[in-house]
Amino acid sequence: MKLLAKYNRVNLAATIIVLLLISIVYYYFIEATLVHQLDKSLVVEEREISDYVKENGQLPEPSADKDEQETFTASNEIIKRKYSSIKLFDNVHKEQVLYRQLEFPLNVNAISYKIEIRKSQEETEDLVQLILKITSVIVLILFSTLFIINRFVLNKLWKPFNSTLEKIKRFNISETNKVILEPTNIDEFTELNDAVSAMTKKASHDYGEIKTFTENASHEIQTPLAIISSKLELLSQSENLKEEQMNIIQTISETTNRLSRL
């Protein structure tokens, strides 16, 4: 697997995981923010009811709309002030509606009441979904941009490396032509080119030294071998040589010729 392909896979997987985690955190953050705004509006309603009781000595008429509901119930129980999210069935629209509710105690003319104020969370949920849709589009655009960058820009950035690799493949140590590498403004590829240039230059130099040495060594060996061959030829032409001596001279001559070819 090529480095660029592996990088793209790792980058793609990491991007997807990070975006999923961020999306989940972002969803709950937006929802918590909008619910907090609802809680603040419930507090405003609570103050208005308390102020109305102080001025008039009685509770106001409770609201019974779909978006906002109020219930006042006389109770002798100990009531704690608390927020909650509940679902109630709407008889008009025949559906379950999610509400944000504030429950708190209120004393009116020595009578303890449990006050419940509810505001619909449907608009909040719709707003959260709208924000998520817009965010999804932005993420999709970002993801597409990253893909284009990884596909085209990185290929262009790796072009000097691929060029250097191709020059290394075509390098022939016996040729005297110097390896010319493509210049680049990327430090790592510049260091690679410098190392390759130094390596090929040293290899060519060492090859030239070995070639010169073998040529000189061959010449120096050929000279005494030629002398030996000529002396053996003269010796073989001598008179009164026995057969055994001729065989020895023939063996020496064959060995000398083999060494000369080597």
Image: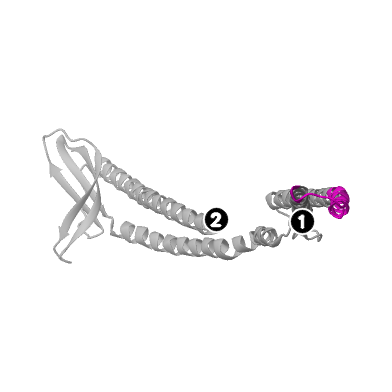
Span of residues in magenta = 219-244
SS assignment at label 1: helix
Viewer-side residue, 225 vs 182: 225
Return the residue at label 2.
Answer: 3
Q: Residue at x 59, y 65 (%)?
A: 152
Residue 129: image quadrant is bottom left
What's the distance in space between the residues labelled 1 and 2, CA to CA? 50 Å
Please check the rendered image and state whether residue 190 is part of the magenta-colored stretch, yes or no: no
Please report whichever mark, 1 or 2, sits nearer to the chain's N-terminal start: 2
Would residue 125 appear left or right of 111 to someone viewing this image?
right
Return the residue at label 1.
Answer: 261
Please state the horizontal and vertical placement of residue 68, each as a whole percent of the image: 25, 56
Q: Residue at x 82, y 50 (%)?
A: 241
Please state the horizontal and vertical placement of residue 232, each as a whole percent of the image: 84, 51
Would residue 185 appear left or right of 59 to someone viewing this image?
right
**Which class describes the residues within 10 Å of circle 1: few (<14), some (14-19), or many (20+)?**
few
Can you say whether 181 is above or below 240 in the image? Answer: below
